[in-house]
Amino acid sequence: MATKIRLQRGGRKGYAVYRIVIADARAPRDGRFTEKLGTYNPNTNPATVDLNFERALYWVETGAQPTDTVRNILKSEGVYMMKHLKGGVKKGAFDDETAQKRFDAWKADKQKGLDKIREQEAKAKKDAAAKELAAEKKVNEAIAQKVAEKKAAEAAAKAEAEAAAEAPAAEEAPAEA
């Protein structure tokens, strides 16, 4: 029986979330599977992967063939790196402890890159919000200035009307005296 490591679709329309499963090569995409290895959510940035590392490594070493997308996921999670390091241990190039150190160093470097991406995205979001706020303040100042000008014009017109109304009254008062 040929086994595949593949994605099984879930989630709602327009928001796909996948399970990473071991299935018979002849089974349909969303059909019966042997074992669930984890989940993959491509909707987040960077994509969220929850993987049972030990079981994934076991199945890769056993010979299960991953699909292209799953192969990329497994590579990014370090399953293939660990398989490669275990091969070096079997050949006697180095011991288990050295292999684990190399893997931990690789994983730490990978995590730094992911943290940097998240940090840049948060900074970009913050900058965009600041720009929006500045633009909104500018628009509000323009509106406030127009309102102030309109009120000043209304006050001037009202003062003129009052002055015009008082002027004939003032002319009549001296004439009567």
Image (cartoon, rainbow, N blue to C red):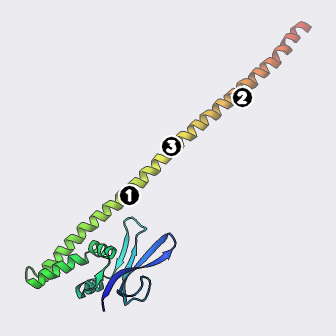
Q: Residue 43 at what x, y percent from top left?
A: 43, 68
Q: CA distance from mark 2 to mark 1?
A: 49 Å
Q: Identify residue for label 1.
A: 121
Q: How many C-alpha atoms fall within 10 Å of the one at disc 2: few (<14), some, or many (≥20)? A: few
Q: Secondary structure at mark 3?
A: helix
Q: Nearer the viewer, residue 146 or 16?
A: 16
Side of 19 relative to 87 (left or right): right
Q: Secondary structure at mark 1?
A: helix
Report the residue marked by disc 3. Answer: 135
In x, y percent, where is residue 28? 42, 85
Mark sitting on residue 28:
none
Q: Is residue 177 visible?
A: no
Which of 62 and 175 lies nearest the eye of the viewer? 62
Which quarter of the rendered picture does the C terminus lie within?
top right
For label 2, the SS is helix
Residue lying at the far left in this picture: please name it.
92
Q: How far is the residue under mark 1 from the one under mark 3?
A: 21 Å
In contact (CB < 8 Å): disc 2 and disc 1: no
Residue in the picture at 28% in, 82% down: 65
The type of residue carrying mark 2 is Glu
> Taking 133 as reference, is 165 above or below it?
above
Q: Quadrant of the N terminus?
A: bottom left
Residue 54 rendering spot, x and y as whole percentages: 27, 84
Rendered residue at 13%/78% (across/down) = 98
Question: In the rendered image, which residue does mark 2 sit on?
Answer: 154
Q: Is residue 118 above or below residue 33?
A: above
